[in-house]
Amino acid sequence: MNVHINVQNFGPIEAAEIDLRPLTVFVGESNTGKTYLAALIYALHQHFEGFSQLPWADSTAYYFGFVRRSRDRYPQKRQEEIEQEILEVLEKLNTPERPFKFSDLPQQVRTRPESRLTDQEDFTNELERCFDLEDVSKLIRFTGNQRNKMNVSLSVRERDQTCWDFEMRAAGSAKSTITGHINPDMTLLAPNDTMRKTEFHEISDVERLLRTLSTRRWRTGDSYYLPAARSGIMQSRDVLATALIKRATRIGLDRLEVSTFSGMIADFLEQIIQYRARRRSSSRISQVAEQLETELLEGKIEVEGIGSEGNPKFLYRPEQAKESLWMSHSAAMVSELAPLVLFLRGIVKQGDLLIIEEPESHLHPGAQTKIAQTLARLVRAGVRVLITTHSNFLLQQIGNLIREGELRKQGESTNESADYLKKEETGAWWFHKNKPVTELPFDLVEGIEPEDHLDIAEDLYNESAGLQNRIEQTKEEDAVESE
């Protein structure tokens, strides 16, 4: 899927056009909108249950079963219409020489995702939840200009066809408006489709088609957000859990007056506090977690209490240590990376979207370069990754990993690392203050390093050279005076 996101006057962002890649990087000064756009992408992914060829594909498949099973509840005439419609769909489906399109599905099945796409409240509610706002109009660009109009649009394409698009507009205190469109000519099965030839040549059930497509072609992943505050959350997790339990009682509600969390922080807290490793990650993803522990943490993240009535406890055992440490007694780097290890060990699966704010936080420059290798390993394992960063070391190493990928295209590679990134699967965007977001294309010499990083390095060098010259000049003047 080619996922294109366009925003205007959204939070601090004047304008941005983003194509999501297997690795998407947001870089730029603070307070330029990196977190805002990352949170928006999380809200969109949560709302649409992933970015697939057909929005809410799983529910569409099961809805067809509901329509089929409910035929007897309709008047006789409507039953006959439904039967006739299904027969027509089956006839088109069993004609391999013609494409099977979205418009070929039964009307009631088409209507469900189309009506959800244009619902005026569902996405607005999710946006308000994620940003912890009472009204989405608070997201309109922070310029004080009440005439600003906010626009959020999403377009999903597959190869040479548009699958569907979505748009939300908001202005001032007026209620936001939502529009959307599913391409009726979108091909669900091509005439020469291998799946069609092997599985649907003599199909007799449209529901089976939809379920098979939702399982294979329309398979979508979940989305997870690791906030920049994860280190502090891990350090104070037990205190937070106790406070939440107390707040759940009437006495607690009366005595506690606390602000609310944004949706991303709340989701992250829930996953950590109720950590159960609900599903086993693939061996490749689990291996990335093990490499993190070995290469960076130099120890193991341990989980105690899973399966008991209490909340699980997270500990850190350094290599060759006899006893484990509480997270609150561990280094900031440990509590920073522990959530990533836990998510990769038992939550994240292939096809998921993992958003990580500032993965370099609390890390030594050498460790920051190793985090870039972790990102490349996740991409190779089939996880889609989006990061926000300020680290030049991280960006430089991503550039090296892309160069490694370019060498592999030519049938060569270095002996230093088996990790690599492809140029076409990596996208970097530069956020500016009061300027549109711009893409940072990969350059063989410069990598994906933004210009302001180079300017800062040059300014520091010039300042350093100037100070050295002044020091030397002062020494020479003192020597002359002493003579």
Image (spheres, helix red, strand yellow):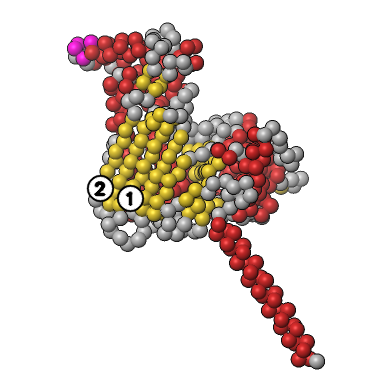
Whether 79 is among the magenta residues is yes
Could you tell me how far apart the alpha carbons at marks 1 and 2 are, in whole angstroms? 12 Å
- Please say whether residue 323 is visible from this viewpoint: no
* Residue identifier under label 2: 175
Which residue is rendered at x = 78% and y = 87% of the image?
479
115 with respect to 275 (left or right): left
Q: Which residues are magenta?
A: 76-80
Whether 296 is among the magenta residues is no
* Residue identifier under label 1: 150
The majority secondary structure of the magenta stretch comes to helix
Q: Is residue 301 above or below residue 158?
A: below
Q: Nearer the viewer, residue 169 or 228?
A: 169
Q: Nearer the viewer, residue 165 or 40?
A: 165
The image quadrant of residue 212 is top left
Mark 1 lies on a secondary structure that is: strand
Which residue is rendered at x = 52% and y = 32% of the image?
351
Q: Position of residue 314 (x, y in %)?
A: 60, 45
Which residue is rendered at x = 71% and y = 81% of the image?
473
Q: Nearer the viewer, mark 1 or mark 2?
A: 1
If you read the primary sequence from the N terminus, does the residue marked by circle 1 or circle 2 appear first? Answer: 1
Q: Position of residue 423 (x, y in %)?
A: 58, 40
